[in-house]
Each structure stands twice: as structure tokens, then as C-alpha cells.
Amino acid sequence: MAALVMTIIGFLIWLLMFLSMRDPMRFFWLSSTLAAGYHQRMVLDRWQRISMRIVAVVFSFFGLSLSVNGLSSALHNRVLGRVSTGLWLALGILFLCAWIFGLVSLIVRSIVRGSITAVLWTDWWKMYRDGITLGPIEVFPAITPAMHKERWIFTAAYFALVAIVICISIYPR
């Protein structure tokens, strides 16, 4: 019973985060209605949008790992157990890569802006204040060509990574 619950919870996490990876505006359900403009400005900024996609990929891998782990426990299947172990290992590597990407992004943005405090505090506060004060922006089209391109790149990379992990995990040792 616990394995089934873990599988369902993992699947729901995977589904929500996978959809959020494809469209970062789906993260809006986490914020209040006052911050809708702030969240929209985050999605329109390329660096923050890519960071949000990376966070969604990491949490999506967590949900997938949880789901496959629960499924392997419920079915007592060794192959699914090996796939689950591979997914947990890939999740650790993805987390490390996301952390390094965040650090590199912070360094690049602080060099461009001139100081690290501008990137960490001033820009965030200005964007948050403007988002609440001014509200959402009317953007047409709502999904720009750059967003559409990123969506397909992230989706293809995600499924390629999952396929590689599954193939390596299934391969007999």
C-alpha cells in the first residue's frame, strides 16, 4: 500500500514539474495573485526562465525516481529497481549540475551588472516591487519564439537523459 501511495505521489510530482518545465508560467500556482506581475517578469527574463526550467527538471526527476522506486517495490521487479537506482544517481548529478549552473549564472550576471549585491538583492527587489505595483504585462504572443525553442530543447534533452539512464540501468552487468 505504501509503495502504491509513493508511486502516485511521485507521478503527480513528476507530472506537475514536467509541465512546469515546459511552461514556467505554471509555477504561478505557487505565488499569490499579487505577485502575478512579478512572476510574469521572471518568466520573460531569459536567465531566470532557464533557471526555473532547471529547477523543474530536478524536481521532475525526483518525482520520476520516487514513482519508479514505488513501482519497483510494489511489483518486486529487479529491473525497475535498477532503473530507480539509475534515476536517483542521475538526480544527484542533475542537482550538482544545477547548483554549478546557478553559481556560474550568478558570477556572469554579477560581472555584467557590476556587483553581486545588485544581482542578489537590488534587482530582485526592484522586479518584485514593479511586478506588484504595475501588475501583469500584456505580451503578444504569450509564448515568444525563444521560449518555444527552449521548451523543445529542454523536452528533448529531458527525454534523452531519461532514455540514457534507462538503457544504462537495464544493460546487464
Image (cartoon, grey):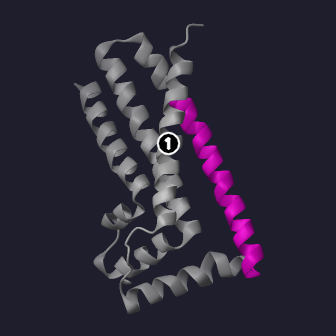
The picture places residue 109, in percent across and down from the top left corner, at 70, 72
Q: Report x, y in % for residue 117.
A: 69, 79
Q: Quadrant of the N terminus?
A: top left
Q: Is the stretch drawn in magenta largely helix, strand or loop?
A: helix
Q: Residue at x 50, y 42 (%)?
A: 156
Element type where label 1 sits in the image = helix
Front residue of 162/124: it is 162
The residue tagged 1 is 156
Residue found at x 36% / y 51%: 19
| Residue segment shown in magenta | 87-115
Say above or below: 120 vs 150: below
- Please identify the residue farthest to the bottom as the structure is shown: 133
x, y percent for residue 67: 35, 32
Q: In this image, 107 relative to 168: left or right?
A: right
The one of 156 and 52 positioned closer to us in this rendering: 156
**Within-10-Å neighbours for mark 1: few <14, some 14–19, many 20+:** few
Q: Is residue 102 left or right of residue 146?
A: right
Magenta segment includes 107: yes
